[in-house]
């Protein structure tokens, strides 16, 4: 079970996010961010959980070619294979397992098992999202990335959170266009 911490916010009102760095084990590091999107919580949760394999390629068509459900029903324990577009120079795929899934609190965590960041200096990488309703049409997303790096790997902390924030911003744009 991932433990959630409320980070200190910084950034502008238009792009409210935060990043904190906390050592949770000897080598494990944690980066946190927050983002508020103009999408109702139930619609956002569906897109980020049960519909991720259908929505992912539509949200990031230049990056994600396909998301295949290899095992499970899309909930806890499910295995997802993200196949990336051939134009991406350094990564072809990543295999992720849903290691946390709770509909009642809109929380999902995905552990990277193969490919992706594990091919680029990381030995462990888990991304988790927790959604909180701000208003009928707004949702706060807490993002947590837990990771370990290989010895000697020069890691820029903001890079771990950058991909998640890019996905969430693209998802918001996609949903605003297609919800109406």
Image (tube, grey):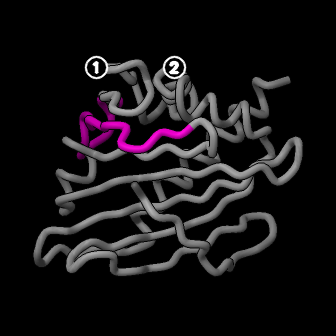
Q: Examine the structure image and report whether residue 101 is included in the region drawn in magenta.
A: yes
Is 164 situated above or below 81? below
Asked which quadrant contains residue 140, the reply is bottom right
Q: Residue 49's spot in the image, x, y percent?
A: 53, 32
Q: Earlier in the sequence, mark 2 or mark 1?
A: 2
Is 75 left or right of 6, judged from the image as shown? left
Marks 2/1: CA–CA distance = 14 Å
Q: Residue at x 46, y 64 (%)?
A: 3
Marking on residue 27: none
Q: Nearer the viewer, residue 11 or 20?
A: 20
Is 143 left or right of 92, judged from the image as shown? right
Marking on residue 70: 1
Q: Residue 79's spot in the image, x, y percent?
A: 30, 29
Of badges 2 and 1, the one in the foreground is: 1
Is 78 situated above or below 150? above
Q: Residue at x 82, y 54 (%)?
A: 134
Is 86 left or right of 4, judged from the image as shown? left
Q: Residue at x 26, y 43 (%)?
A: 89
Q: Residues within 10 Å of mark 1 (few under 14, many from 20)?
A: some
Q: Residue 118's spot in the image, x, y percent?
A: 20, 52
The residue that label 2 is drawn on is 54
| Predominant SS along the magenta part | strand
Q: Residues within 10 Å of mark 2 (few under 14, many from 20)?
A: some
Q: Nearer the viewer, residue 164 or 80?
A: 80
Q: Which residues are magenta?
A: 83-102
Q: Residue at x 17, y 59 (%)?
A: 123
Q: For mark 1, give the secondary structure.
A: strand
């Amino acid at each position: 079970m991932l433990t959630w911490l409320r980070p200190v916010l910084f950034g502008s009102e238009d792009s409210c996010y935060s990043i904190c760095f906390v050592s949770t084990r000897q080598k494990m590091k944690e980066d946190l961010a927050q983002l508020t999107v103009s999408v109702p919580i139930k619609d956002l949760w569906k897109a980020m959980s049960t519909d991720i394999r259908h929505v992912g390629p539509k949200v990031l068509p230049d990056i994600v070619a396909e998301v295949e459900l290899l095992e499970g029903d899309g909930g806890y324990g499910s295995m997802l294979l993200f196949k990336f577009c051939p134009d991406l120079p350094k990564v072809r795929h990543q295999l992720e397992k849903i290691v946390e899934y709770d509909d009642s609190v809109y929380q999902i965590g995905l552990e990277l098992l193969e490919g992706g960041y594990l091919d680029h200096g990381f030995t462990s990488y888990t991304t988790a999202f927790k959604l909180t309703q701000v208003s009928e049409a707004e949702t706060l997303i807490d993002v947590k990335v837990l990771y370990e790096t290989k010895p000697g790997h020069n890691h820029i902390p903001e890079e771990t959170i950058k991909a998640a924030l890019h996905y969430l911003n693209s998802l918001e744009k996609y949903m605003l266009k297609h919800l109406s």
